[in-house]
Amino acid sequence: MNANLIAPTPSAYAYPLLIKQLLVNSLSLYGDQEITYRGEMRYSFREFRQRIGRLASALSALGARHGTTVAVMDWDSHRYLESYFGIPMMGATLFTVNVRLSPQQILYTLNDSEAEIVLVHADFVPMLEQIKDGLKGVRHIVVMADGQPEPETALPLAGEYENLLGQASPEFEFRDFDEQTKAATFYTTGTTGDPKGVSYSHRDIVLHALVAATSLCAQKDGQRLHREDVYMPITPMFHVLAWGLPYVAVMLGLKTVLPGRYVPELLLKLRQSEQVTFSHCVPTILQMLLQAAPQDGAPDLSGWKMIIGGSALSPVLCEAALARGLDVFAGYGMSETGPIVSLAQLPPGFKAADPREEVRMRCSPGRPVPLVDFRIVDEEMRDMPRDSKSQGEIVLRAPFLTQSYFKKPEASEELWAAGYLHTQDIAVMTPGGFVQIVDRIKDVIKTGGEWVSSIEVESLIAEVPGVQECAVIGVPDAKWGERPMAFVVCKPGMELEPSAICERLLGHVESKRISKFAVPDTDRIAFISEIPKTSVGKINKKALRGQPLTSDESSAGLRKDSARVGEVLRSVNYKPE
Amino acid sequence: MNANLIAPTPSAYAYPLLIKQLLVNSLSLYGDQEITYRGEMRYSFREFRQRIGRLASALSALGARHGTTVAVMDWDSHRYLESYFGIPMMGATLFTVNVRLSPQQILYTLNDSEAEIVLVHADFVPMLEQIKDGLKGVRHIVVMADGQPEPETALPLAGEYENLLGQASPEFEFRDFDEQTKAATFYTTGTTGDPKGVSYSHRDIVLHALVAATSLCAQKDGQRLHREDVYMPITPMFHVLAWGLPYVAVMLGLKTVLPGRYVPELLLKLRQSEQVTFSHCVPTILQMLLQAAPQDGAPDLSGWKMIIGGSALSPVLCEAALARGLDVFAGYGMSETGPIVSLAQLPPGFKAADPREEVRMRCSPGRPVPLVDFRIVDEEMRDMPRDSKSQGEIVLRAPFLTQSYFKKPEASEELWAAGYLHTQDIAVMTPGGFVQIVDRIKDVIKTGGEWVSSIEVESLIAEVPGVQECAVIGVPDAKWGERPMAFVVCKPGMELEPSAICERLLGHVESKRISKFAVPDTDRIAFISEIPKTSVGKINKKALRGQPLTSDESSAGLRKDSARVGEVLRSVNYKPE
């Protein structure tokens, strides 16, 4: 066979897709554009580029080379943004440490990632002190004093971030290398087993930026990003590269506001003073913002576009945000998927017949973005009909999915079974391509031979007046196999009886929205003061189940889940309507 | 050195960037979207995909394999769009034949490209008959009757397009292959030498589509593309893949209108009946459209966004188009560059102090698009200051530039000298990043030791009342080396004297816009009825100079041009202001 490949002339530039290429156009056209840290400090893209050079020179002086892993522990800052570029541009790997994990988990991830240099904000120095004796590969620690005096510590410090940058040269030759070079790594907090290392190449990050930009910008009016937006991430920068959106913002030359540690009042102040128009966050942050913003008048929230992800956006919260003028819409993805693979942008020509329909659309994971092969399949990998009711697992192909877990070959193969990335999310699709998540495979409850969606029961309980938040899990039951158990948080000042919740749910049984097996028994409805959340704001069902948080059940756990995929799919798909 | 490459798990899908991937999202979300041919025939994206399968099956039955070159000679049709996808998706190479070339040139390109199958519209059958005895590799000819009875011809036909598709299966397995596979090829008409074969890989085409989409969609309001636009190309589909924009339209799921052979009245009718909102064309077509559209009322042109490329958009034409409500803006690129490397979108926050400033911006090649490293350099590859006056050659790096000319190693190396693609365009850049082309290197005139821009003189002559169009070349002169010679077309019913033109230009000498050497002598101003144009609508200066059109001076010619680059740059950059 004639391979029919293009034969480049020897002098032709092959143009590998490297993170440094995202800077070319911004620096050429938007060199004066601003980056501000908390509104207290600001500099231009031009200075940003110089500081990237200084960072690389400073790290290089500490021995960082192509292939060195450099860990960052910081709030959302300009320093973090510098690391997003400077570290991978050297050919080193940026490790974004999840600072909300326990000290022992952080120790595990620092050792597992083979980090050699750690850049650490003063706030996290005490945590690092706790685990310093267990660190295996770390050779240098650079502290980020963040404008304060250097913290006193027993840690051997290589220097302070600003001092090192000040002494280093802005001239650093960022060479070309293979676009498959590992640019960034981080750990999924997962809900089972030890954290698993996920990584992205330069090519992954550049392609994710292009696809996300295309999808976000192509929208006619609502739910869109454009060149005149002011961008402020409110998803931690350690979390899946803040959904890859800082790379999009820099590529497009947008004014970028980095809010530091999230304080609702400061976020609202920055929104106002810096004229922020585009953000993204988890539902919990959105709720905090709405609670912190006075209902009448300033600060005005209208025209603030916001992607909501991490966990499901509830219709109640969505409506509250829309009422304040926020253009909120969900996005869907996982640590392993880039992350953005679908966005709840309203479709072309959409006119809501019923405002609730629009809310439902905005709260759904939305529709797949370009180039993403987004399938909902049964356990034989057959596509399910798009009839809003046939359930299957979401499996994906895209040019920016993680290609393996670090040093976890079995879990990696499970992730990529049959050549598609398995999300373990059970979903249905509407004829128009909108996805609706039914449940996580491991959260589906099997009771009395029936499969019950924990998410569905949660959303119905959330509608009960007086309920602020709730979570539903399956608990073992001698007679029924499993039974649903609900944890409920009441609104401040409200009190509820379990019977009130049961009565309400039984009403939905009568209207056939759920089966009677889905209604928790009154002694399995617990009122608690707070729903436990994972470090990235998802409901922590593992904690609710009282499971150990760091046990090593990873690949075995995955195999169990995989077995469950088949079991769940076989039953839900053949369940009579 | 630790290569630090991502190690994919064996089952991971690598996701090569292939043209077929552009269809995934459109088919998933926009299967009902329409493609229409002249408004007479229409079908859905779903049917489009089936016909792509049928086309591949039919070509396969004719022996087309991975690596086979399949030539297309057609007007802008749905068949062409099917070829844009079906042929490369098989791993074969789509050769878009420039049907405006002479029969001898077409023969040359069919043989040089090693085309084995030709899909030919009935209108071009007589041309093919003329050259059939010279065809070396063509094994099958498929005629496209376009709804008419099959033409009578002595050519041995393998069948008629619709018949073959009707008999072929829509099921064709489009396999994965290397993203560097040659997807499409065509020939630059050039202005010197034989046509040169340019080719693009699947990766080139996908990345060009993503970058063009990002840049076009990111604009806040004017000069932008969005998901609700209706797209109609008016740049021939044989010409640099219609600037790659049909791929963008299909990726975004836009309604697509294919106008067949360009007839101004039909184009205007389609604009109206199909609600076209986004197009692209050369200035000549724009002028034809404005002339054909009645001045008062219907058809309404407002809200029609249009990229103008191929040759310079003149301020006069731009103003006329803006006055009719067209949102016209220039784009820049060459056959070798993807093609789009810059777009004249108004910058963020732009407010015109002077309406002429806005017109100047819209007529310029604009500003580079993301990921394009767009430099203006002297002959030592040093960047020129961005002061709107320091001239240099435009050189480029981008992830979608042609990597070589087919079977022309010397010309390929000249194109890529020093690892940058050399455009041979002399330009300046404003501090804001707007490019202004001063001249093509080979069109600059050296007279009395001074370098004169033919484009600058042309634009000043175009301002003289009564002038419709003009072209300026350098002609040999015993005393001055060269002298400018102007060819002028007057507006219908107008007559002008050479002296009127000279007087006007001398006024610009007084105001120091041009040097006195730039003013043609009265006996070197010729009034003609039409400016000769190349097959793609550019001023054919080669024809004006009376040069042979198909002489084989290719690589030697390029070397001569390269010598001139240095000569031109050395003088213009050190010329006192």
Image (cartoon, coloured by chain):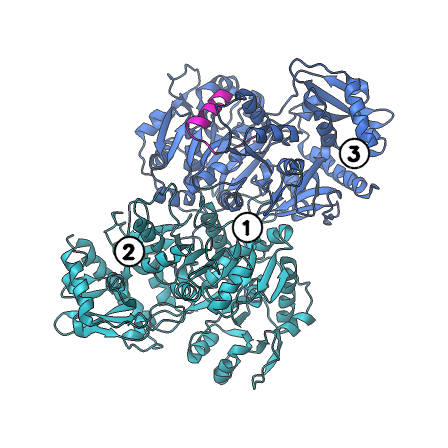
Chain colours: A cyan, B blue
The image shows residue B208 at horizontal and vertical percentages of: 52, 43
Of the two numbered discs 3 and 1 in the rendering, the one whose residue sits closer to the viewer: 1
Residue found at the far right of this picture: B479
Q: Is residue B9 left or right of residue A531?
A: right
Instruction: Measure how far apart labels 1 and 2 are at the Cα level.
Output: 36 Å
**Residue B427 falls in image quadrant:** top right
Q: Which image quadrant: the N terminus of chain A?
A: top left
Farthest residue in the bottom direction? Answer: A154
Decide: few, some or many residues near mark 1? Use Cα within 10 Å; few <14, some 14-19, many ≥20.
some
Residue B314 colored in magenta in the image: no
Question: In screen coordinates, is B560 left or right of A331?
Answer: right
Residue at x 83%, y 24% (from the top left corner): B477
**As shown in the figure, which amino acid type bears the numbered disc 3?**
Arg
Which of these two is toward me, A29 or A510? A510
Residue beneath the point at 50% across and 62% down = B5
- How far across and how far down the image is residue B45, in percent? 36, 36
- The residue that mark 1 highlights is A228
The quadrant holding residue B424 is top right
